[in-house]
């Protein structure tokens, strides 16, 4: 009970954050800041307090309010045109991507927006895609006002350069759904109509029924043949034209033969045909295709720099400031970058003190200072005051973005790894054709009347339905299992490639090291309570990430209300202020005035502290390697070669050498292009390479590799285009995940054996020319369903065995 | 037994009805988002009460 009370006391009613210092009391509820209280006030005025009853503390912290000028670019007609999907005289419709949507309260509030703002006509949320589609009356409410309203509630839409070139909304594959509907409809009805035939009831039913049923089946099967299965014919035709035999060829052949033989039987009244098998086959095949195409909607795997860069930037002409879409930025433009804005193109610093956060680009968490005249590469985020820069390269030609222009990037680098299905279907088809022709010739010799029947029967029964299903179902289910392990694949086919990888290449910063939690130590005198409180009080005044980490390190017990006089923050240097008349310095060695050889190595950052004239010591921020890193690397090194590519200097070489196996390659000071070339070189040497990286600087390497895995601390945020997006917390599972991929491949082999067994049974009837429709009608669904069951179950059990996740279900 | 002709006809028409309903559901976008509606259905529509001024003070 005590714990509960404490929670109520210290957690913000709106956002659930712990309240440091004094809480704001309002309406008998405590809030951490004015922002949170403001949102509560707004919601309660509009009778929307249900927001808080659906989930507890569902709100988003308002401690860092969005600056007023941030969305001024939305006033520009040009930009509006590109963002708004539909507009008539009164209403506009726009859809936003909202990464902060996280619970059912969010859905409720976002769909109740019309109660707050009468200009909003209708809003609808899609939780998985984190999208909200809003219709609003642009006479009452401007786009800018709408976005500002959303931001003030904590739901800031993510607007990026990518949105400007938005194509039509991507729909799920509706055509496939229609085809499945048609095939399923025909399958069920033909089965029903064929029932009398199965039970041999035709002696009871009169001749007229048999004829009627036959024609009905034919009519029902025509749309299946012409519409539902047309993709198989198209695919088979295309592959033959390219001189390859894929799995669709025997499928299309089987469907074709089945349809014409059945039609012949019905019209000539010699039998009832195989329409039930035909429609069932097509239905199951489409089902497999659907499973294979199901992807993870919530994640975007195709992000490039455009989904990260801003929509517009402020350009200065003389003293006049105007907003220009980033796409129209020219060399020589003078741009204004405010706090927390991203620099969209390589530019030279003209005015202001630059402290750039390159964490998206390199994974490095520390701010980098730049001085007047230096070139700042695109992709960095300014923290602190405003900057004036002169654009020195166009957006698409910048140091970083030119990666996307390179040949290796634009050329669709087909991976040389072939799927099992591709390899096997070639031999399967050839064997099948030989068998069909062989039995036809055999019967032509002994009993020509049976020749045609035997030939078609072989093609019908050997139609590799179960084979075509085994890969999609095994891989599709394995992909779902990996998704539960927070390892998200772009498509199921990636698993097969993973099983065949023999060389893993790691990036260092952000991939092997943890960006969010740096390990902090204080070295020097033991801090007294009073001293800790003074340091905390000073750090409270700063927004610098290191200050926040020091605060966190000192803990809430040291949070204090000491008054700070003459506070000053020197960007890139440190903080100073007077507490109780004593001057305190926190910052770099030179700033604090300590004469120490700056022995900084690549991973550690030092912050020195001086109170009055006493130098107390320094905080050391050591970037930590991920938990269990050596176990993961050891596990992986059994079957894979390992390499390390780092953009940093080689100060960490010794520590890394202890973690990596002896034969591992370690390369330092690699540029993004170097990384890409290294992977390319490995591939040229016939290796099958998987790149594991995180930042935009790895984007080229991730793309060129057979498989690119991007490690992300928060999967909702930016990650470069890749085949896999992995939650950083799953990093320790990496070696088991690769093991699981290999196991999944074995499941496919086994299910292939099972489907071959069914084929052999069926073929033994077929070559004798004795295949009756009922055998086909029984064998086809049984083989398909048993393959589906086997693969689904096996992939699930193997996932448990490899401890991909703990909980049952 | 001729009643069977009619019954089969009716059953086919019904099945066709279901097929048309399915096509309509796909067309109207019901297959686009299979999660949010499951949450949305649990929201209660409260009768509209005028916001109570005294409470928000």
Image: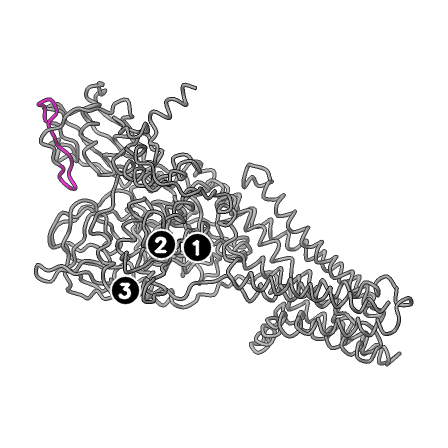
What is the distance, in whole Å, between disc 1 and disc 3 at their CAs?
Answer: 23 Å
Whether labels 3 and 2 share one chain: yes
- Dot 2 and dot 1 residues touching (CB under 8 Å): yes
Evaluate whether residue A254 shows in this view.
no
Query: Residue A207: x percent and y percent?
Result: 88, 73
Query: Residue A228: x percent and y percent?
Result: 63, 69
Please identify the residue farthest to the front as the structure is shown: B50
Q: Nearer the viewer, residue A594 or A260?
A: A260
Q: Under tag 2, what secondary structure?
A: helix
Image quadrant assignment for residue B26: bottom right
Q: Which residue is mark 1?
A: A708
Chain-order first, disc 1 or disc 3? 3
Q: Left or right: where does residue A516 sit relative to residue A191?
A: left
Q: Which residue is mark 2?
A: A698
Q: Under tag 1, what secondary structure?
A: strand
Residue A576 on the magenta segment: yes
Segment colored magenta = A569-583
- Which secondary structure dominates the residues rendered in magenta? strand
Q: Which mark is residue A396?
A: 3
Q: Under tag 3, what secondary structure?
A: helix
Residue A580 on the magenta segment: yes
Query: Residue B24: x percent and y percent?
Result: 56, 63
Q: Residues within 10 Å of mark 1 (few under 14, many from 20)?
A: many
What is the distance, in whole Å, between disc 3 and disc 2 at their CAs?
Answer: 17 Å
Chain to which mark 2 belongs: A
Chain-order first, disc 3 or disc 2? 3
Q: Left or right: where does residue A163 sit relative to residue A347?
A: right
Q: Quick check: A235 above or below A661? A: below
Q: Name the residue rendered at 39%, 50% in the picture.
A: A693
Chain to which mark 1 belongs: A
Q: Residues within 10 Å of mark 3 (few under 14, many from 20)?
A: some
């Amino acid at each position: 009970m005590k714990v509960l009370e404490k929670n109520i006391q210290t957690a913000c009613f709106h956002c659930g954050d712990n309240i440091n210092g004094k809480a704001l009391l309002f309406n008998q509820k405590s809030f951490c800041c004015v922002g949170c209280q403001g949102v509560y006030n707004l919601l309660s005025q509009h009778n929307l307090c249900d927001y808080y009853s659906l989930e507890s503390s569902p709100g988003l912290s308002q401690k860092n309010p969005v600056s007023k000028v941030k969305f001024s670019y939305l006033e520009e007609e040009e930009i509006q045109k590109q963002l708004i999907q539909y507009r008539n005289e009164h209403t506009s419709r726009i859809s936003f991507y909202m990464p902060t949507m996280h619970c059912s309260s969010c859905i409720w509030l976002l769909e109740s927006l019309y109660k707050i703002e009468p200009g909003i006509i209708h809003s609808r949320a899609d939780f998985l895609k984190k999208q909200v589609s809003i219709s609003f009356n642009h006479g009452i409410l401007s786009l800018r006002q709408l976005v500002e309203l959303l931001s003030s509630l904590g739901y800031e839409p993510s607007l990026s350069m990518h949105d400007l070139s938005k194509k039509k909304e991507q729909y799920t594959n509706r055509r496939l759904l229609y085809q499945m509907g048609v095939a399923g409809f025909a399958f069920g009805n033909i089965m029903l109509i064929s029932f009398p035939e199965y039970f041999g009831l035709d002696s009871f039913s009169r001749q007229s029924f048999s004829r009627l049923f036959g024609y009905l089946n034919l009519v029902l099967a025509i749309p299946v043949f012409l519409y539902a299965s047309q993709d198989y014919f198209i695919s088979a035709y295309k592959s033959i034209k390219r001189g390859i035999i894929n799995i669709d060829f025997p499928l299309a052949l089987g469907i074709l033969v089945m349809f014409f033989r059945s039609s012949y039987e019905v019209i000539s009244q010699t039998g009832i045909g195989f329409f039930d098998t035909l429609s069932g086959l097509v239905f199951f095949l489409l089902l497999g295709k659907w499973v294979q195409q199901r992807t993870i909607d919530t994640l975007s795997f195709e992000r490039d720099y455009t989904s990260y860069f801003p929509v517009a930037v402020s350009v200065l002409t003389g003293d006049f400031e105007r907003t220009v879409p980033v796409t129209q930025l020219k060399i020589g433009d003078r741009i204004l970058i405010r706090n927390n804005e991203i620099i969209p193109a390589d530019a030279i610093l003209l005015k202001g003190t630059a402290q750039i956060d390159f964490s998206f680009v390199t994974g490095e968490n520390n701010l980098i200072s730049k001085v007047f005249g230096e070139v700042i590469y695109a992709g960095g985020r300014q923290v602190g005051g405003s900057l004036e820069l002169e654009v020195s390269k166009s957006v698409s030609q910048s140091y970083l973005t030119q990666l996307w222009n390179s040949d290796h990037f634009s050329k669709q680098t087909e991976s040389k790894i072939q799927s099992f299905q591709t390899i096997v279907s070639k031999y399967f088809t050839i064997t099948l054709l030989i068998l069909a022709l062989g039995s036809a010739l055999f019967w032509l010799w002994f009993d020509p009347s049976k020749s045609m029947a035997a030939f078609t029967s072989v093609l019908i029964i050997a139609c590799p339905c179960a084979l075509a299903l085994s890969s999609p179902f095994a891989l599709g289910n394995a992909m779902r299992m990996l998704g539960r392990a927070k390892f998200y694949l772009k498509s199921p086919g990636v698993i097969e490639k993973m099983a065949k990888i023999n060389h893993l290449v790691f990036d260092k910063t952000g991939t092997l090291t943890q960006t969010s939690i740096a390990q902090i130590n204080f070295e020097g005198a033991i801090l007294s309570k009073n001293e800790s409180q003074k340091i905390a009080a000073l750090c409270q005044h700063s927004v610098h990430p290191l200050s926040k980490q020091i605060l966190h390190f000192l803990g809430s017990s040291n949070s204090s209300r000491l008054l700070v006089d003459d506070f000053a923050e020197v960007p890139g240097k440190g903080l100073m202020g007077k507490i109780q008349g004593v001057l305190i310095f926190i910052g770099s060695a030179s700033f604090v005035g300590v004469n120490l050889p700056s022995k900084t190595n690549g991973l550690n950052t030092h912050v020195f502290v001086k109170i009055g004239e006493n130098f107390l010591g320094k905080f050391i921020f050591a970037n930590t390697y991920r938990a269990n890193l050596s176990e993961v690397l050891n596990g992986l090194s059994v079957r894979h070669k390992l390499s390390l590519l780092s953009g940093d200097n080689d100060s960490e070489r010794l520590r890394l050498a202890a973690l990596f196996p002896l034969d591992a390659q370690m390369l330092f000071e690699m540029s993004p292009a170097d990384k890409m070339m290294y992977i390319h070189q490995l591939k040229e040497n016939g290796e099958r390479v998987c790149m594991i990286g995180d930042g935009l600087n790895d984007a080229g390497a991730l793309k060129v590799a057979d498989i690119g895995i991007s490690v992300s601390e928060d999967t909702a945020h930016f990650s470069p285009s890749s085949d896999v997006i992995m939650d950083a917390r799953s990093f320790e599972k990496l070696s088991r995940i690769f093991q699981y991929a290999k196991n999944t491949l074995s499941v496919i082999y086994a299910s292939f054996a099972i489907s071959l067994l069914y084929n052999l049974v069926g073929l033994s009837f077929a070559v004798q020319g004795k295949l009756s429709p009922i055998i086909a009608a029984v064998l086809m669904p049984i083989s398909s369903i048993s393959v589906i069951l086997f693969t689904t179950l096996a992939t699930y059990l193997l996932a448990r065995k490899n401890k991909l996740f703990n909980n049952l279900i | 037994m001729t009643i069977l002709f009619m019954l089969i006809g009716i059953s086919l028409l019904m099945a066709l009805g279901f097929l048309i309903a399915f096509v309509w559901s796909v067309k109207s976008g019901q297959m686009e988002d299979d999660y949010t509606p499951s949450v949305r259905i649990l929201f209660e529509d409260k009768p509209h009460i005028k916001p109570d001024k005294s409470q928000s003070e």
